Image (cartoon, rainbow, N blue to C red):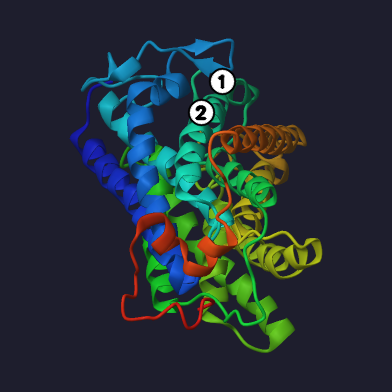
Amino acid sequence: MALNSGDIAFVLMCTALVFLMTPGLAFFYGGMVRKRHVLSIMMQSFAAIGVVTVIWTLFGYSLAFGPDHGHLIGGLDWFALKGVGLDPNPDYAPTVPHLLFFLFQMMFAIITPAVLSGATAERLRFPAFLLLCAFWTVLVYVPLAHWVWGNGGWLRNLGLMDYAGGAVVEMASGVSGLVAALVIGKRLRSKDDLAIPHHMPNVLLGGGLLWFGWFGFNAGGAMGANAVAVLAFATTQIAGATGMIGWALLEWFYHRKVTVFGAVSGAVAGLVAITPAAGFVSPASALLIGFVAGGICYLGVSVLKTKLGYDDALDVFGIHGIAGTWGTLATGIFADFALNSQGRNGLINGGGMQPVLVQFLAVVTTYAFTGLLTWLILKGIALITPLTASEEEQENGLDLTQHGENAYPDFDFSENYFM
């Protein structure tokens, strides 16, 4: 097919929206931590932009989307973007330049390790994060992206439906975040600790930017200004809204109040859940997918984490892992072939159990692969540099000890370490 200027303009806009999500995530996470760690967690998102861009350009994209080798990985045919130019690639995006498809996918690769960083907030040292970001992108994200989205990838060949990253982005970051939190250990805490988040306006700003960017994240997956893009845009909005409502209702049931933090968390849960399903399900299905996601993520954060005692600092597994799992399974239940010929009918539309079983296989595979590889990567990094900041570094704040800066220069941390 020939290049289409409308599709090019649309995908360019969506690419910029997905990029905006990473700075938005920096504000979201920055508002959620204590004052002495805000620059540290924000810097990890920005560092991911630099590290992943270089890796993706040199060989990451080629290994993820290049010509298939054994249904497990691409080749190095497109090393340093050799052959990735202004002509379209009919396997992935027949109406936009191949270089634009590369850019769009790069934004997904960038934000995924940035999301992961929330699980280890307030105690992961910056040198360790840089190594984790690099090795995790190469050894976890790239192979998983090929399996799910690459031409010839084994999960794609089985018929897995993952429209915009339920496995590749959401479950991968959530499960890896949980493993990282367990390996690195808990944050230094004190009975004098004040409640966090420390800056709710930034949480709301970041959450709003994430929601805004999610339209590019999901609608852009259509790779053109077409009907599937409209469907993905609509289901994204609907699921985000019902996710917020689902979380808020449970919060009201248990505590007789709806917190601002809970509302924005529920919205993110709904957006995560619709990510694998956005271009495959109806708006009515999106209502239910988002609503359930808000409720189960509330329980995951308020009940599961409390009972098991792990320190997933910013609830990466509690939201991205749990909602990503539900959304991936829900895609196999609610998918409607009449809406998108690239998908298939789910369980309720006459597709039987096979789509659900394929989606379930992807869940099991993603958990096992990302969990084991993340554990191995962290153990390897620990041989090079310490993972966890010392008690003194955590007391004085990672902003000062890792970056030599202070987000609030007029605040005297020496009088109260735990704000």
> Dot 2 surroundings within 10 Å: few (below 14), some, or many (20 or more)?
many
The quadrant of the image that shows the N terminus is top left
Q: Which mark is residue 200?
A: none
Residue 338, above or below 37: above
- Residue at (37, 10) in percent of width and height: 77
Q: Which residue is mark 2?
A: 149
- Across and down, in percent, residue 258 comes to 59, 83
Residue lying at 31% horizontally and 46% vertically, measured from the top left: 14
User: Looking at the image, is 19 positioned above or below residue 149?
Assistant: below
Q: Amino acid at mark 2?
A: Trp
Residue 77, visible in the rendered structure: yes
User: Disc 1 marks which residue?
Assistant: 153
Secondary structure under tag 2 reads helix
List x then y, in percent, for residue 265. Answer: 55, 68
In-front residue for pair 276/74: 74
Q: Residue at x 47, y 56 (%)?
A: 236
**Would residue 216 be found to the left or right of residue 135 on screen?**
left
Q: Residue 290 placed where, x, y %?
A: 59, 61
Question: In front here: 390 or 90?
Answer: 390
